[in-house]
């Protein structure tokens, strides 16, 4: 029996049928979404601002979707363990990420990544933004960021600042000040804000560089005197604090939290998630909860979100190169 190669017309017909079946199945899957629990994976430990935001969003998203939304914590590698996990799962809208601005920092600090930190993600929306705070103890001799920088230039390495780890946004913000001004603030890394604050208040490190969500309650309690904030959008109680960009030209930075997923989520599913998340973020209740944390409820479009991350990676790459910091 002689085998005959199928005609091109026959192959084309079969391909068309298969494409129709697959697109119909994909459309039905999108129409049925969600028919099982949705997960939001957080790259940081329970109790922090990322975890808090994920649970606040998840609770409301569950009501809007009519399905359980589970928050799963997978801390490590500046959030990259969680991202890598979701990148290895189906792009179906059932595995989402609560990303923090640490994503941009980690992308800049790593020599290689197994995925593109912008192009390979489906950007849903930011949920909150907040600045960083440069602060000192109430008894500190430095009354302004100008004074602090002048002292750090006069006596290189004599004034220390803390971060929550090498290669974090806290660390790179301090190095940004050094690179932009010629100052020489000494970096002291810690494993989190809580142990860093203990040493800061005990006088073992001179300067706090931390998120507004962490520094805000310390400022209200009177244990920290803020010298500068890195964004113009601040809580009412901190409106008299200097904006860093007015002291060091170009020094403007806004931390963020947002929802994303693996690229390729069906368009109907991605659009529904965007509409629901944006509606949650715009709600008066959510805005009030963010203000209580010292943050702003900030929705975005997918392109705005991706553009923010792309710009931040470029900015941090400049700081890393200028300071000769070794990428991991």
Image (tube, rainbow, N blue to C red):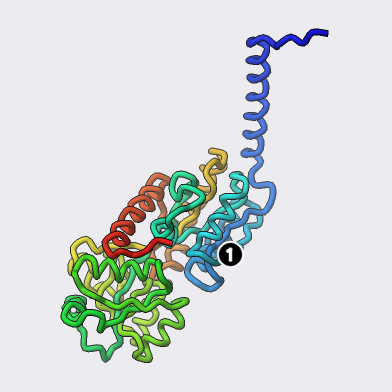
Q: Is residue 292 visible?
A: no
**In the image, residue 56 lies at what x, y percent?**
53, 64
- Residue at far right of view: 1
Q: Is residue 13 visible?
A: yes
Horizontal relation, residue 78 to residue 93: left or right: left
Q: So how many labels did they put on this image?
A: 1
Q: Quadrant of the C terminus?
A: bottom left
Q: Is residue 224 above or below residue 308?
A: below
- For image coordinates 40% across by 57% down, the residue present is 104
Horizontal relation, residue 44 to residue 204: left or right: right
**In the image, residue 116 lies at what x, y percent?**
46, 47
Q: Is residue 247 above or below residue 111?
A: below
**In the image, residue 142 lies at what x, y percent?**
21, 84
- For image coordinates 30% across by 64% down, the residue present is 324
Q: Quadrant of the N terminus?
A: top right
Element at label 1: loop
**In the image, residue 9 lies at what x, y percent?**
64, 10
Horizontal relation, residue 190 to residue 84: left or right: left
- For image coordinates 37% across by 50% down, the residue present is 310
Q: Is residue 115 above or below residue 245?
A: above
- Name the image quarter holding residue 231: bottom left
Q: Is residue 4 above or below residue 232?
A: above
User: What is the crowding at mark 1: few (fewer than 14 residues within 10 Å), some, or many (at least 20)?
Assistant: some
- For image coordinates 45% across by 61% down, the residue present is 100
- Name the image quarter holding residue 10: top right
Would you name the residue on which mark 1 appears? 74
């Amino acid at each position: 029996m002689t085998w005959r190669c199928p005609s091109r017309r026959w192959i084309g017909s079969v391909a068309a049928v298969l494409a129709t079946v697959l697109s119909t199945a994909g459309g039905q899957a999108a129409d049925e979404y969600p028919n099982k629990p949705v997960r939001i994976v957080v790259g940081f430990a329970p109790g922090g601002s990322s975890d808090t935001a994920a649970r606040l969003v998840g609770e409301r998203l569950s009501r809007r979707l009519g399905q359980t939304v589970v928050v799963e914590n997978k801390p490590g590698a500046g959030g990259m363990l969680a991202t890598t996990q979701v990148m290895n799962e189906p792009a179906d809208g059932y595995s989402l990420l609560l990303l923090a601005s640490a994503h941009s920092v980690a992308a800049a600090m790593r020599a290689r990544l197994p995925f593109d930190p912008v192009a390979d993600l489906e950007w849903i929306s930011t949920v909150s933004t907040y600045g960083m705070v440069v602060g000192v103890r109430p008894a500190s001799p430095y009354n302004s960021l100008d004074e602090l920088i002048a002292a750090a230039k006069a006596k290189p390495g004599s004034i220390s600042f803390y971060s929550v780890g090498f290669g974090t946004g806290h660390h790179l913000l301090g190095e940004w000040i050094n690179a932009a001004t010629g100052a020489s603030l000494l970096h002291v890394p810690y494993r989190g804000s809580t142990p860093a604050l203990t040493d800061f208040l005990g006088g073992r490190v001179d300067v706090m560089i931390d998120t507004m969500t962490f520094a805000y309650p310390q400022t209200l309690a009177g244990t920290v005197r803020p010298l500068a904030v890195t964004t113009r959008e601040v809580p009412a109680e901190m409106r008299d604090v200097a904006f860093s960009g007015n002291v060091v030209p170009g020094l403007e930075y806004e931390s963020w939290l947002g929802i994303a997923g693996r690229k390729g989520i069906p368009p109907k599913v991605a659009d529904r998630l965007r509409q629901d998340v944006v509606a949650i973020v715009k709600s008066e209740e959510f805005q009030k909860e963010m203000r209580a944390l010292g943050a702003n409820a900030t929705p975005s479009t997918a392109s705005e979100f991706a553009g923010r991350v792309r710009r931040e990676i470029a900015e941090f790459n400049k700081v890393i190169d200028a300071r000769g910091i070794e990428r991991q």
